[in-house]
Image: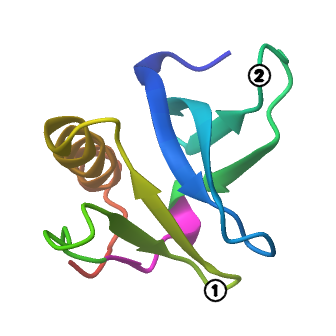
Amino acid sequence: MAETLKEGRMFKRGKLNKEWKLRTFILNASKLSYFKGGNPNPAGFIELTEIQEILPFDISEGIFQVSTPRRVYEFKGETREETLEWRQAIIDTCLDANIKIKL
């Protein structure tokens, strides 16, 4: 199993149900996985190599977006600081892996 670079909770807006849901996230060198409740199996994940763009932090909404060919994910932390930390951790991990993303 890959080394965990960051772990914690964030809200994720659903693809079909646009409600914000609190999920546990684990970021490693290749993907960002998210989990529902205490389930040890991920509910989903984003391969970092699929990320095309990480949109700037939206101060008015307190969110950031991650764009892939399949969809645009929306995230927000439990605080503004956590949101910024998660965004930066994903950016840093992509850059460390030489993954070209638009910022």
Nearer to us: label 1 or label 2:
2
Q: Nearer the viewer, residue 103 or 85?
A: 85
| Residue for badge 1 | 69
The reply to whether callout 1 and callout 2 are in contact (CB within 8 Å) is no
Query: What colour scheme has been applied to the protein in the rendered image?
Result: rainbow
Give the residues in magenta: 49-54
Q: Is residue 23 left or right of residue 41?
A: left
Q: Which mark is residue 49?
A: none
Q: Is residue 30 visible?
A: yes
Identity of the residue drawn at 32% across and 75% down? 101
Q: Name the secondary structure under disc 1.
A: loop
**Cα distance, mark 1 to mark 2?**
27 Å
Identity of the residue drawn at 62% across and 35% down? 23
Amino acid, disc 1? Pro
- Asked whether residue 53 is drawn in magenta, I would say yes
Q: Is residue 99 left or right of residue 46?
A: left
| Residue for badge 2 | 37
In the rendered image, the quadrant that contains the C terminus is bottom left
Residue 96, by quadrant, is top left
Q: Report x, y in % for residue 102.
A: 27, 82
Q: Is residue 10 left or right of residue 90?
A: right
Q: Is residue 55 left or right of residue 44?
A: left
| Mark 2: few/some/many CA within 10 Å (<14, 14-19, 20+) | few
Q: Report x, y in % for residue 20.
A: 58, 55
Q: Report x, y in % for residue 62.
A: 24, 61
Mark 1 or mark 2, earlier in chain: 2
- Asked whether residue 50 is drawn in magenta, I would say yes
Amino acid, disc 2? Gly
Q: Nearer the viewer, residue 8 or 48?
A: 8
| Mark 1: few/some/many CA within 10 Å (<14, 14-19, 20+) | few
Q: Name the secondary structure under disc 2.
A: loop
Identity of the residue drawn at 63% across and 86% down? 69
